[in-house]
Every structure is written in C-alpha cells, then in structure tokens.
C-alpha cells in the first residue's frame, strides 16, 4: 500500500531540509585577516634536494590539506581580498611554484587537478622553449593557462637582480628584464599578470621600488603570513621542500600569523663582501604582548644575539657571517590564543663573495 504525504507536510519537510545543514557550514566559517602562501620548486624524486619535494610527500601534503579542511584559494584572489581589507576564511592558503619546472606539469598538476586545487606558476621566460627540458615548454604552459592555472612573472633571465646594482644602468636593465618576461607571457600565452616573484627571493628597497613602479605585486622566499598591512612589493612565502617538506612543517606554516615589525636597516640588506657582522634593530608594532617569549633564529653558519632595548624594541646582532649567499633571520612569538601557532616575521640578508660576482645558486 502506498503512503501519500499530504502536500502541506511535504512543503514543511522541504523547507526544514533546505534551511539547515550545508549552508550553515559556509556561513559560520571562522574568518581571519591573513593567509599563507606556500612555495614549491621541483616535485620529483631525482632533482636537487634543497629545492625539491618527492612526489609521495607532495601527495601526502595535498591529502593532509583536504583532511584538515584547509582552504586553497587562487593567489590573485587572496591579494585582492587583502588589498580591499576583506576577511578571509581561517587557514586560507595559496600554492605557488617557481621556475616552471617540467615536474610541476607531469607530477604536481595531475594531483592538483584531481582535487580541483588552484595554483600559480612563476615563469622565468628565457628558460622556456618549444620543447620541454628541465623546464616546461610553451605548449605545456599554454595547457595550464587554458585550464585556469595562474601564470606569474619570474623575470626573463632569472639573474641575481642585485648583483650589478652599483652600475649606472642597473635600474633600466632590471626594468627591461621584468618587462621582457611580461611581453613574452603576453605573446605566447595571451595573458597579463600583476604577480611577480623575485629570482632566488632576493630583493632590497631599490628593487622593490622598481617592482612597484612596474605595477606588480612582489613575492619573496622569506617565511611568514600575508596580510593587508604587509608590504605588497615583497610579500613572504613559506618554502616547502628539502628538509622543510614534512607535514608538521606544513602545519606550522599554515597556522602562522603576521608579526608586524619595523626594521632598521630595511628588509633585504646587502653586506659588503668583507663584512662578517651585522646589527639589526626591530620594533614589534603589533601582535600579542608576551614579548618575553620572542625568539629569533639565524640561518646556519651565523651566531645571533637578541637584546631588549626598550618598549617592544630589540637589537639583533649576527657575527661570523663568512659564507656568501642569503642569510635569513626568523623571529617567532607564540600565539597565546591558539596552541602551536606562532606570529612570524622573517628578514633577508645577503652577502656577495669577495670577487663581487655575486654567488652561485
């Protein structure tokens, strides 16, 4: 015998069903004023360890992102939201790749595509040809672009942009190099982009001014979260790879908050080749008040001393800076409101070799 539901009761059931479960999940999302940008290079098992993550570890990370409910947004959407002072869902991240290596197309993209996760590839255009090598081909980049993958500017030549900064034509040469990359992306892919990633993550105030004059949003390779109060000429990204490829490292990055700091000298200082010490003065201009828990860590090969100088003011002294290359200082402060979360700030310091020919990657 068939049971017929009266029309009035059916309408009541439908109204109750439509008004409750799924939409409530989206409308009650925790919101925040910051996001985190992740940086990858190679996704392969036979590439340089320092800039690589294995295919297995990359898949594990993507599974972890899904299982923990992290939200992956296009990088341009995050930038737009921050510029407009809009709040974001908590634990929003962007995924980026530098250098357009072929392994991103062959190994990373299928996994990202299967999960419908957006990402950005920053392209140094001089390395791209008609056939794939270590780098993608123009055809592969076109395939990604047509599939909705964001393409960013990573310069044309991928040189150490600060290596010839004392030459009178330095600024014009750098501008032309960045512009040439933009023109090649337009010619080959029919796209324009405001997203720019510094080669090797190297920048200083003069280079930041050139990027700003070109109307670009700049990204480095120093760690930290991004927010509306950040410097849009040198936004931080968390490098994920090598010894920093674990899931726990991924969680630490994604759960970071912005530690607002004013630094003197400004971020991106360049030592003279014969200098072995460096003094940095910082003022923590925001964040929690538990500054007794502030800790700053140097990169390998340096010794660091952190001294309290006044109200929220500190002096950081580095010594024994003998190796040429990039040296970073990471400062962290525990978030008293969230266990295992840290306010994070990173400083970039560069030391050329004695021959002043800069250093090899």
Image: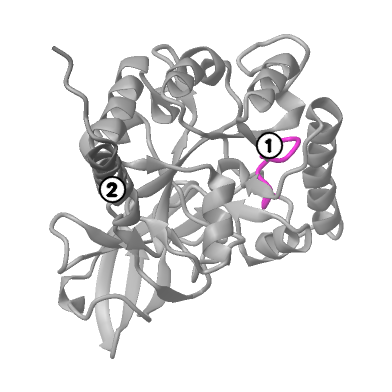
Report the side of 181 relative to 49 (left or right). Answer: right
Lower sequence index among marks 2 and 1: 2
The quadrant in which residue 4 appears is top left
Q: Is residue 43 left or right of residue 315?
A: right
Contact flag, marks 2 and 1 (Cβ < 8 Å): no
- Which range is magenta? 153-163
Q: How many marks?
A: 2
According to the image, label 2 marks what residue? 25
* x and y percentages locating residue 55 in the rendered image: 37, 16
Circle nearer the viewer, 2 or 1? 2
Residue 154 highlighted magenta (yes or no): yes
Q: Main secondary structure of the magenta part?
A: loop
Q: Is residue 192 magenta?
A: no
Quarter of the rendering occupied by the N terminus = top left
- Position of 293 with respect to 164 (left or right) is left
Q: Is residue 276 visible?
A: yes
Q: Can residue 269 be seen?
A: no
Q: Is the C terminus in the top left, top right, bottom left or bottom right quadrant?
A: top right
Q: Residues within 10 Å of mark 1 (few under 14, many from 20)?
A: some
Q: Which residue is mark 1?
A: 158
Badge 2 element: helix
Please give the name of the residue rendered at 61% of the width and 26% of the height, measured from the top-left corner.
Answer: 100
Q: Residue 148: give x, y in percent of width and height.
A: 62, 30
Numbered disc 1: secondary structure: loop
Tell me if residue 177 comes above or below residue 190 in the rendering: below
Question: What's the residue at 53%, 71% (across, down)?
Answer: 266
Residue 126, numbered label: none
């Amino acid at each position: 015998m068939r049971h017929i539901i009266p029309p009035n009761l059916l309408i009541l059931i439908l109204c109750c069903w439509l008004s409750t479960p799924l939409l409530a999940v989206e409308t009650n999302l925790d919101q925040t004023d910051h996001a985190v940008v992740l940086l990858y290079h190679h996704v392969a098992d036979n590439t340089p360890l320092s800039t690589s993550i294995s295919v297995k570890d990359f898949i594990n990370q993507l599974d972890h992102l899904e299982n923990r409910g992290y939200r992956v947004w296009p990088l341009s959407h995050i930038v737009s939201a921050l510029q407009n002072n809009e709040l974001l869902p908590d634990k929003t991240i962007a995924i980026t790749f530098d250098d357009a290596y072929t392994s991103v197309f062959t190994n990373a993209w299928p996994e990202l595509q299967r999960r419908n996760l957006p990402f950005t590839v920053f392209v140094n255009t001089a390395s791209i040809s008609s056939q794939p090598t270590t780098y993608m081909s123009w055809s592969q980049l076109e395939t990604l672009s047509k599939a909705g993958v964001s393409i960013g500017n990573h310069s044309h030549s991928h040189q150490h942009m600060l290596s010839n900064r004392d030459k009178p034509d330095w600024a014009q040469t750098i501008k032309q190099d960045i512009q040439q990359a933009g023109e090649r992306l337009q010619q080959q892919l029919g796209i324009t982009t405001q997203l720019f990633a510094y080669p090797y993550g190297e920048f200083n105030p003069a280079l930041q001014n050139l990027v700003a004059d070109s109307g670009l949003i700049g990204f480095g390779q120093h760690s930290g979260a991004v927010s509306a109060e950040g410097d849009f000429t040198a936004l931080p990204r968390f490098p994920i790879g090598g010894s920093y490829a674990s899931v726990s490292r991924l969680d630490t990055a994604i759960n970071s908050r912005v530690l607002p700091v004013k630094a003197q000298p400004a971020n991106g200082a360049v030592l003279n080749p014969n200098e072995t010490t460096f003094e940095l003065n910082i003022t923590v201009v925001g964040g929690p008040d538990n500054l007794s828990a502030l800790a700053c860590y140097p990169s390998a090969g340096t010794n660091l001393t952190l001294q309290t100088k006044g109200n929220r003011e500190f002096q950081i002294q580095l010594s024994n800076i003998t190796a040429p290359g990039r040296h970073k200082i990471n400062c962290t402060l525990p978030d008293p409101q969230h266990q295992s979360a840290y306010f994070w700030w990173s400083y970039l310091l560069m030391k050329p070799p004695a021959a002043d020919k800069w250093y090899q990657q």
